[in-house]
Image (cartoon, rainbow, N blue to C red):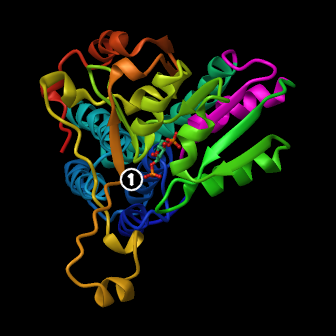
């Protein structure tokens, strides 16, 4: 885990040196903890103001993964309650450190529990397809592998940043039979696939899942062949603002992740788009696997209402 400053963490999340919805959330909590320990503020309210401004900056590092604002909000909401209780600077600092540690611990445990719950869906002989590089989805596969289940995995490359290579290397290192395919080959292979398992960056109240670009195409193809489509996601990937009808912003990244600057200069007049995520509607998803159990996507709204009884009070910006 990083012990970077808020600025370093902001830059690393933005450049995707730190990436993955769960990892960026934990990195933000880690950066807030470091700030709380090292800040020179002389009163608790002063420290809170510094943390609130740092939290705001961290939230702006990437716009789609709701895990990032949810992590910052978890710490700041707890901290503001401490402030209301009139804690001394020392007590307030300790509280913030505890909250950051608590988020990181909960997040790590959630991934492990999802691995356990999700692994029950994998059986001997399965061919499982996964996309991008999701810690939660990988934990499902690694846990099933540790239970000695014999299955194969197909991993899509996940252009333009090729996170599929990271996933296939992790799985192969553990001795899982892995095949890496181009994203565009997913329909050709889907008839062989028994289950798709992917992660999520954000989940909307209507059960739609925002995940790495290409996920919705895979879901569409899986739907065609009646292949089960599972999403493995911690509950801090649920987007409270969608309970109020707000949309999840889709990050658009640099065109130079798709083509080189040189190529684009030589081929002027071409527009290059690079959306990082897409939206898979609920009807293409069979199950959302969380650390609180499994939910059909249409039922996720009930869990969201339980976790966010007053969504209008959540500061998601
Ligand atoms: P975990 C990643 O986003 C991928 O879209 C992945 O499916 C999702 O976050 C969830 O990842 P990016 O940071 O939290 O690569 O399950 O853009 O690791």
Categorize mark 1 by other alpha carbons within 10 Å: few (<14), some (14-19), many (20+): many
How many numbered discs sit on the rendered protein? 1
* Quadrant in which residue 246 is drawn: top left
Q: Position of residue 273 (x, y in %)?
A: 28, 63
* Quadrant in which residue 7 is drawn: bottom left
Q: Range of the magenta residues?
A: 120-147
Report the residue at 76% width, 44% height from top. Answer: 178
Inspect the magenta stretch and tell me whether residue 14 lies in it.
Answer: no
**Residue placed most toward the observer, 148 or 109:** 148
Report the residue at 50% width, 21% height from top. Answer: 290
Look at the picture and state if 280 lies above or below 10. Answer: above
Name the residue tied to disc 1: 32
Q: Position of residue 1 (x, y in %)?
A: 58, 54
State which quarter of the image contains the C terminus: top left
Residue 129 shown left or right of residue 64 in the figure: right
As helix, strand or loop, the secondary structure at mark 1 comes to helix
* Quadrant in which residue 281 is drawn: top left
**Residue placed most toward the observer, 6 or 66:** 66
Residue 50 shown left or right of residue 209 in the figure: left
Report the residue at 24% width, 75% height from top. Answer: 270
Task: Determine if the C-beta at disc 1 is less than 8 A from ligand 1.
Answer: no
Q: Position of residue 71 (x, y in %)?
A: 37, 40
Q: Position of residue 136 (x, y in %)?
A: 57, 35
Inspect the magenta stretch and tell me whether residue 141 lies in it.
Answer: yes
Q: Residue furthest front?
A: 188
């Amino acid at each position: 885990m990083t012990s970077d400053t808020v600025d370093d963490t902001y830059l690393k999340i933005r450049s995707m040196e730190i990436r993955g919805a769960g990892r960026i959330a934990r990195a933000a909590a880690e950066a807030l903890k470091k700030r709380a320990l090292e800040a020179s503020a002389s009163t608790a309210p002063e420290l809170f103001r510094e943390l609130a401004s740092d939290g705001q900056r961290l939230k702006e590092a990437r716009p789609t993964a709701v895990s990032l604002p949810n992590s910052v909000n978890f710490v700041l909401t707890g901290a503001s309650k401490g402030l209301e209780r009139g804690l001394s600077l020392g007590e307030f600092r300790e509280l913030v450190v505890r909250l950051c540690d608590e988020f990181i611990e909960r997040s790590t445990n959630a991934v492990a529990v999802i691995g356990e719950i999700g692994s029950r869906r994998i059986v001997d002989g399965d061919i499982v397809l996964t996309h991008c590089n999701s810690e939660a989805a990988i934990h499902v596969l690694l846990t099933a592998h540790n239970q000695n289940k014999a299955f194969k995995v197909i991993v899509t490359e996940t252009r333009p940043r090729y996170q599929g290579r990271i996933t296939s290397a992790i799985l192969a290192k553990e001795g899982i039979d892995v095949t890496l395919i181009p994203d565009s080959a997913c329909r050709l292979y889907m008839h062989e696939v028994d289950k798709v398992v992917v992660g999520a960056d954000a989940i909307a109240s209507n059960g739609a899942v925002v995940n790495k670009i290409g996920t919705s195409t895979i879901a569409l193809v899986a739907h065609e062949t009646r292949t089960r489509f599972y999403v493995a996601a911690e509950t801090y990937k649920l987007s409270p603002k969608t309970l109020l009808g707000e949309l999840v912003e889709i990050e658009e990244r640099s065109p130079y992740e798709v083509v080189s600057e040189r190529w684009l200069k030589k081929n002027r007049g071409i527009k290059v788009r690079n959306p990082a995520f897409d939206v898979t509607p609920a009807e293409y998803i069979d199950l959302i696997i969380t650390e609180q159990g499994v939910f059909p996507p249409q039922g996720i709204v009930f869990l969201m209402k339980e976790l966010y009884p007053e969504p209008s009070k959540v500061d998601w910006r």
